[in-house]
Image (cartoon, coloured by chain):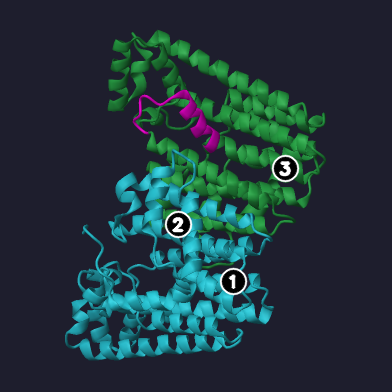
Chain colours: A cyan, B green
């Protein structure tokens, strides 16, 4: 699909409202990022400019900015931390898109579609290296250490997920371990770094980290739930890709656990065949699947409640409230 | 090919002799590396164990150890620096092997052959992240900073090389820029870090860095030369892969420059067709190609002379002499 960008949907408008308190700071981060992606390096310039055009919702940057403001105020280091985290996230997306055979991201052809697999792997590597280099230029080693550790966890989560493709017997603990790394780790790191660089005491930094971890998990669980249950018109991304790719996610695990052995084997056969997950909306699976989905919603809700209670350790104020509203919105209705 | 390892060739025996002064320290680095590749992480363990089995000649580690000894003596940090550099090198190899469609490395199936492209990309990413994490645990930020910068240059060199595949008009400056990043950057970083962590003054660290950069360039130029001219029995790796993959290297650039327009077009047609580079050994290319090869040997020799003269800034002694002999050997006859 090409053509002019679609008008903002209602959730997108709501997100813009929620990000309003840090809109100016987000623009500063965006400028910092563009300066990383538009270096005076003629040879890499076309690839980096392409990468810079993906932009994104910059939710990780928004988290860093809101936590920093809530915990004592933003300093220039927060802009760099937010930008570095977005660079690491961008590198993972370049590699993911290649490996998933994705064609487009945010209306742009994926990097590998235009420049090939070599360029996609190596540019992702370059972006990781550049992100680490920027972290080494900060006032101390905290950012480098926390983000190197988090990046390892992100990669590990992705590896575990890929090694377990097609495994109908995936346990809930294994699933949680995967999403913890894949999505929880960077949000956890962002919360910790934003609080620490705002001068918050360890107790507050630990609470900001816990908020990030639980929120990240909730976002990923909602993403996985929508992949099976979402309305394509509202979600605005391709759905059913987890089922088609042999990825067991929480709704399927919970459904499996509700089924008697015979039906369980039927579900496994359909799962192994891939294709369309429409079987989940037909009898005899429809009822237990709806129950499983409700259970997932409860789990997500419980994570969001815990994330909100972690936030109570942060200093009260409008920035903490804005972060709470943003977390709630993203956990209930991502897009 | 499987079966028992081949008996050591004469150059391999000579390399073992040259590395003898640091054999004990290299074993310590190997132990450090194996501890990175055999973590108590059950899920990643099979992949990491596989990676650990590649081992390698550990030439980058040997350089760090010899420079460190020559510049004031080894400290525990040298083992970590040597290991971290080898980890970064290993990560680049995992990605290169995948992108080049290689089947084997050092008698083991490549990681992607056994575990798929997903695992190869993501495990390479994990190894990068782990290498950076280890660097953040050292006594100061020097290693993190220097290696993040060098890793970016390695990736950049690889990207440039891949973007220029099939470009018969590649300039010598572009070629040098590619190998400078691809191979020069990590040896340059290794020389600088080894000298600095041995307490050497900046002048000596700069000389060790310059030695590494020139030596790395010479090694890569010899590698590229052997790809076109080597005896498969002696070199023990597949040859002609650069030509087949559309990579212009120095011998071809120098040959191109010697040819009149008509022959130049014939060479270009053969280069674009890929296949076997046997045309270079037949008339009318044979004579000018031999001259081009001799020019390349002179260039390599000049780099080795300059590398040797950089070494003279390091304190005189048996370790400096051992490093000089190792550099000379690798620049003249890698395998």
State which quadrant residue B34 falls in. Answer: bottom right
Which label sits in the foreground, 1 or 2?
A: 1
Mark drawn on residue A194: 1
Which label sits in the foreground, 2 or 3?
A: 2
- Mark-to-mark CA distance, 1 and 3: 34 Å
Q: Secondary structure at mark 2?
A: helix
Q: Residue at x 35, y 22 (%)?
A: B277
Q: Is residue B109 visible?
A: no
The residue indicated by pointer 2 is A91
Q: Which residues are magenta?
A: B165-181
- Left or right: A200 in relation to A278: right
The image shows residue B150 at horizontal and vertical percentages of 58, 44
Mark drawn on residue B184: none
State which quadrant residue A202 falls in. Answer: bottom right
Which label sits in the foreground, 1 or 3?
A: 1
Q: Quadrant of the N terminus of chain A?
A: bottom left
The image shows residue B141 at horizontal and vertical percentages of 69, 54
Q: What is the chain identity of the residue bearing mark 3?
A: B
Q: Quadrant of the C terminus of chain A?
A: bottom left
The residue indicated by pointer 3 is B194
Tell me if residue A246 comes above or below residue B191 in the rendering. Answer: below
Do residues under tags 1 and 2 come within 8 Å of each other at their CB atoms?
Answer: no
- Mark-to-mark CA distance, 1 and 2: 21 Å
């Amino acid at each position: 699909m090409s053509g002019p960008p679609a008008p903002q949907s209602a959730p997108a408008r709501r997100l813009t409202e929620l990000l309003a308190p840090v809109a100016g700071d987000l623009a500063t981060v965006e400028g910092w990022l563009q300066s990383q992606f538009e270096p005076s390096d003629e040879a890499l310039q076309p690839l980096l400019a392409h990468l810079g055009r993906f932009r994104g919702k910059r939710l990780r940057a928004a988290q860093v900015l809101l936590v920093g403001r809530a915990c004592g105020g933003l300093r220039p280091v927060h802009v760099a931390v937010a930008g570095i985290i977005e660079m690491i996230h961008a590198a993972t997306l370049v590699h993911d898109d290649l490996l998933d055979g994705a064609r487009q991201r945010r209306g742009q052809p994926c990097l590998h579609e235009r420049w090939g697999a070599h360029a996609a792997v190596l540019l992702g590597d370059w972006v990781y290296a550049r992100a680490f280099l920027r972290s080494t230029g900060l006032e101390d080693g905290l950012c480098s250490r926390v983000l190197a550790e988090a990046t390892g966890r992100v990669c590990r989560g992705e590896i575990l997920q890929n090694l377990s493709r097609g495994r109908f017997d995936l346990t809930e603990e294994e699933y949680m371990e995967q999403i913890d790394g894949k999505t929880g780790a960077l949000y956890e790191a962002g919360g910790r770094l934003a609080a620490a660089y705002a001068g918050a005491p360890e107790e507050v930094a630990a609470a900001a980290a816990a908020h990030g971890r639980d929120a990240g998990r909730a976002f990923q669980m909602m993403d996985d739930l929508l992949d099976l249950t979402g309305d394509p018109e509202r979600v605005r991304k391709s759905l059913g890709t987890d089922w088609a790719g042999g990825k067991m996610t929480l709704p399927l695990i919970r459904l499996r656990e509700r089924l008697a052995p015979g039906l369980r084997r039927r579900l496994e056969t359909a799962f192994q065949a891939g294709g369309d997950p429409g079987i989940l909306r037909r009898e005899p699976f429809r009822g237990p699947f709806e129950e499983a989905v409700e259970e997932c919603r409860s789990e997500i809700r419980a994570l969001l409640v815990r994330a909100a209670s972690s936030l109570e350790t942060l200093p009260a104020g409008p920035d903490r409230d804005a972060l709470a509203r943003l977390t709630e919105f993203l956990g209930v209705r991502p897009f």
